[in-house]
Amino acid sequence: MGRQKPLYYVLIIIVATGYGFIAFSIERWETRYLIPVYGILFMLYGWIIRDAQPGNVSFWLITALLFRMIFLFSLPTLSDDFYRFIWDGRLWNAGYHPFAELPSSYVQHGITGIDQALFSKLNSPEYFTIYPPISQFVFWLSVKISSQSILGSVIVMRIVMLFAEVGSFWVMHKLLRQFGLPSTNILIYALNPLVIIELTGNLHFEALVIFFVLLSVYLLLTNHWIGSALSLAAAVGAKLVPLIFIPALVGAMGVKKSIRFGAVTILFLLVLFFPLLDWQVFQSMSKSLGLYFNKFEFNASLYYLVREYGFWKYGYNIIQTAGWKLGLIAGILILLVSFRKGLTWNHLVNENTFPSLITKWMWSLSIYFLFTTILHPWYITTLLALSIFTTYRFPLVWTGLIFLSYAGYNQHGFQENLWLTTLEYLVVIGYLIFELKSKQAFAFLSKKNET
């Protein structure tokens, strides 16, 4: 690793102190402390990645892992989703199916650990669980190892996240080297404050999604297509969002190879979802997903404009009709991006063009995020992970601004500040347009010089 600058160690102490405050001292609603601390962390992060050299990448990766470990023995302070994780895990451990009934139905069953105290901490007690099998397995494992202690279960889940993050570092390093991209690109992800706080700190399972998605790319690149299919299925088993990556793969592979790859993926998904293969489970999950997309609103962009139009024209919130229509438009755009000409399997098996597939995935995810009615901060960590294999940096800008959505929390609940939401999207979309224009100008100049 070589000898590091003394300034680096000063930066590390300051950054570690900031993460310590967020892990142990700052509540979600304490915006006057939370936003400034995050702002300082993000500025120092920007300083580090601009100054980083290939020779000190290993040093910073170890540092990034140490930053994550600061959260190991704390309860998440910015998210209460982990209570539902533990609730589901305790039901599995007691032999009950989390999808079968609403949480309120289990309180009276006398199940160990399923009591009014834990029930009162659930943020969506009136909805069925929506977490797929890989996530459910981690929930169960955390309770199996620590059945009585909430903190103990959190620590187990954190250890799983840390292993996933280390796995992502390894795969990112391999892919960057094979693509001939700067090794320092990995630090854009590894040291990002949003990634550290939301994945390890707040226990969001994008950490598993990122690892399995990138592992799928690496295995496909090294001609281990069965392993690649299994890994992609595992990503879907952690969260359903990676399903939107499949069209781009199909577009690149063609019909024949897609059938083979898809058959293995579907077979493994059936194995993963086998414990959930029940009509009642399907109804419960689809009902919760329907409510998720047709009732909840958070940090949206295009949807908020459509909603305001609805208030102006009809006098009420049109989310029930606008939500699915925006989803349909997003789906069509994703298909257009995925099947765009110029990327075929013959090109894909060449490692130098593999980043074009990842770029399509990045655009697909960006379209989904711009049309969704809900965009929590941790969602875009996957977008950031994909972006390190491209020349686009708008996801990095987004990770700095999306944290402003926490300003809506208060001691009594949540009231979104639409001025901050507007600022977030104006800057992010503006920077995206700037990048697109810059690349077009560069391409034009290059062609002009060739002539």
Image: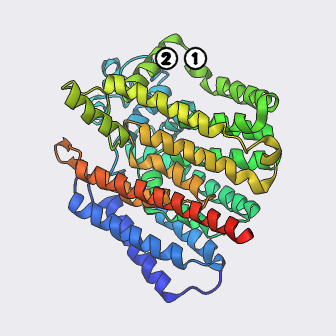
Marks 1,2: beta carbons within 8 A? yes
Residue located farthest toward the left when viewing the structure as drawn: 412
Task: Return the mark for residue 277.
Answer: 1
Residue neighbourhood size for the residue with mark 1, other residues' Cα within 10 Å, grouped as few (<14), some (14–19), many (≥20): few
For image coordinates 33% across by 50% down, the residue present is 78
Q: Position of residue 135 (x, y in %)?
A: 53, 36
Q: Where is 441 relative to 202, above or below? A: below
Identity, as a three-letter code, of the amino acid under mark 1: Leu
Residue neighbourhood size for the residue with mark 2, other residues' Cα within 10 Å, grouped as few (<14), some (14–19), many (≥20): many
User: Quarter of the image containing the N terminus?
Assistant: bottom right
Q: Is residue 147 left or right of residue 314?
A: right
Q: Position of residue 85 (x, y in %)?
A: 43, 36
Q: Is residue 391 left or right of residue 90?
A: right
Q: Which residue is mark 2?
A: 281
Kindly state the secondary structure of the residue where label 1 is placed. Answer: loop
Q: Is residue 10 left or right of residue 133?
A: left
For image coordinates 68% across by 68% down, the residue present is 448
Q: Position of residue 218 (x, y in %)?
A: 73, 50
